[in-house]
Image (cartoon, rainbow, N blue to C red):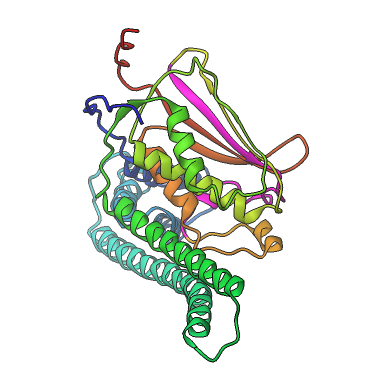
């Protein structure tokens, strides 16, 4: 890679803010529905409506947004539905008890929903790991045991094949552990984006080298124009994004099918759009956004016989979001297959070109 330019001190966006905004949006939606149907709903119905918001926020947005939803729901219920309306004043003392119970039930419901969601994720993780760890370990143990058994009648070619199996399965274990560690670091905020001005082709080329063995026998087409602007990214993190996408293409598409990487500068010169496409079975309807959830595996992957812990695409989303970009998945309109579309903004001013 070229000599790195000085790191750019550009703050990363805070994806959690979107979760808090979504929680407020859910409360606003519940308030709107309650206002439109207030002549048909009693106070207990309105309380249940707000409790539903808290449950959804806890299940989909996390602890902080669910606690915000619980608190704002009580305030909205008081402000819009308890006389005197459009004030936080309460003339009847019985409503104070109603608010207290409503808040307590909301907090308990939020906690129970988070425990249920955590348990579901833990079960998904254990299920994925039990398979993904057992399969390579069984292959390594079997090959190593055979090599250790001096009485086994195996020739040199068979020995080499077993050693290759051990190396391949060890690499598979290493990738699984690496994804688990990366996901943990992303969620804890321990990954800091160290931006450097780099040409995109350098990052893509390095990623292709790392997955060369997995892509063996596949035509790989790259279309990266020479006039693409430099991108201010963390080279290690962005390389991992392309590695994960290419490994997905290798695992979940037929052997020998092509892979394409195409990039274009935006019309305004404010970013770069990238596509990583394959000719596999495509994405099942409704899975396009869920593919980026932790531990989720698409329904169209079963036909290839490959499985995984479902962390690779979640890591891609986390890294791209940390760079202020976006990532989305869709089916290709021409001939089938899936395409992953990435956008990376141009942050700051690129360094001047070195003199020739």
What segment is highlighted magenta in the picture?
270-294
Left or right of 31, for residue 303: right
Question: What's the residue at 25%, 42% (across, down)?
Answer: 192
Given residues 61 and 156, the one toward you in this image is 156
- Residue furthest to the right in view is 335
Q: How far from the left and from the top, in percent, is residue 112?
A: 36, 70
Front-lying residue, 235 or 78 = 235
Residue located at (55% from left, 69% from top): 160
Residue extending farthest front: 156
Q: How many marks?
A: 0
Kindly tell me whether residue 31 is visible in this rendering.
no
Figure quadrant of the C terminus: top left
Residue 185 position (above or below residue 336): below
Q: Looking at the image, can residue 100 be seen?
A: yes
Report x, y in % for residue 349: 30, 15
Quadrant in which the N terminus is drawn:
top left
Q: Is residue 286 one of those drawn in magenta?
A: yes
Quarter residue 328 falls in: top right
Viewer-proximal residue, 111 or 194?
194
Q: Is residue 222 magenta?
A: no
In the displayed structure, 235 sits above or below 47; it is: above
Instruction: Name the residue at the bottom extreme.
Output: 151
């Amino acid at each position: 890679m070229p000599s790195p330019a000085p790191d750019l001190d550009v703050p990363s966006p805070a994806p959690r803010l979107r979760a808090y905004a979504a929680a407020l949006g859910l409360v606003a939606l519940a308030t709107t529905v309650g206002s439109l149907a207030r002549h048909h709903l009693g106070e207990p119905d309105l309380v249940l409506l707000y409790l539903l918001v808290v449950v959804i926020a806890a299940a989909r947005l996390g602890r902080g947004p669910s606690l915000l939803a619980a608190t704002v729901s009580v305030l909205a219920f008081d402000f819009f539905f308890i006389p005197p309306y459009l004030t936080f004043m309460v003339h009847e003392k019985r409503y104070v008890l109603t608010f207290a119970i409503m808040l307590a039930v909301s907090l308990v419901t939020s906690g129970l929903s988070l425990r249920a969601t955590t348990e579901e994720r833990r079960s998904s993780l254990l299920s994925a790991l039990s398979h993904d760890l057992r399969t390579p370990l069984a292959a390594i143990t079997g090959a190593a045991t055979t090599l250790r058994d001096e009485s086994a009648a195996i020739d040199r070619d068979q020995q080499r094949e077993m050693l290759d199996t051990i190396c391949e399965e060890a690499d598979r274990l290493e990738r699984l552990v690496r994804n688990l560690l990366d996901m943990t670091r992303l969620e804890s905020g321990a990954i800091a984006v160290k931006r450097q001005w780099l040409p995109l082709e350098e990052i893509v080329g390095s990623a292709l080298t790392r997955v060369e063995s997995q892509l063996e026998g596949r035509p790989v087409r790259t279309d990266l124009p020479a006039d693409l602007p430099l991108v201010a990214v963390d080279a290690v993190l962005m390389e991992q994004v392309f590695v994960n996408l290419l490994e997905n293409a290798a695992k979940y598409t037929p052997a020998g099918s092509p892979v394409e990487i195409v990039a274009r500068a935006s019309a305004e010169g404010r970013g770069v759009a990238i596509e990583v496409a394959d000719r596999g079975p495509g994405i099942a309807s409704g899975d396009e956004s869920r593919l980026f959830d932790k531990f989720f595996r698409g329904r169209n992957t079963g036909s290839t016989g490959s499985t995984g812990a479902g962390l690779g695409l979640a890591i891609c989303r986390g890294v791209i979001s940390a760079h202020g970009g976006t990532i989305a998945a869709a089916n290709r309109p021409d001939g089938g297959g899936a395409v992953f579309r990435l956008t990376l903004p141009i942050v700051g001013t690129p360094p001047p070109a070195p003199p020739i």
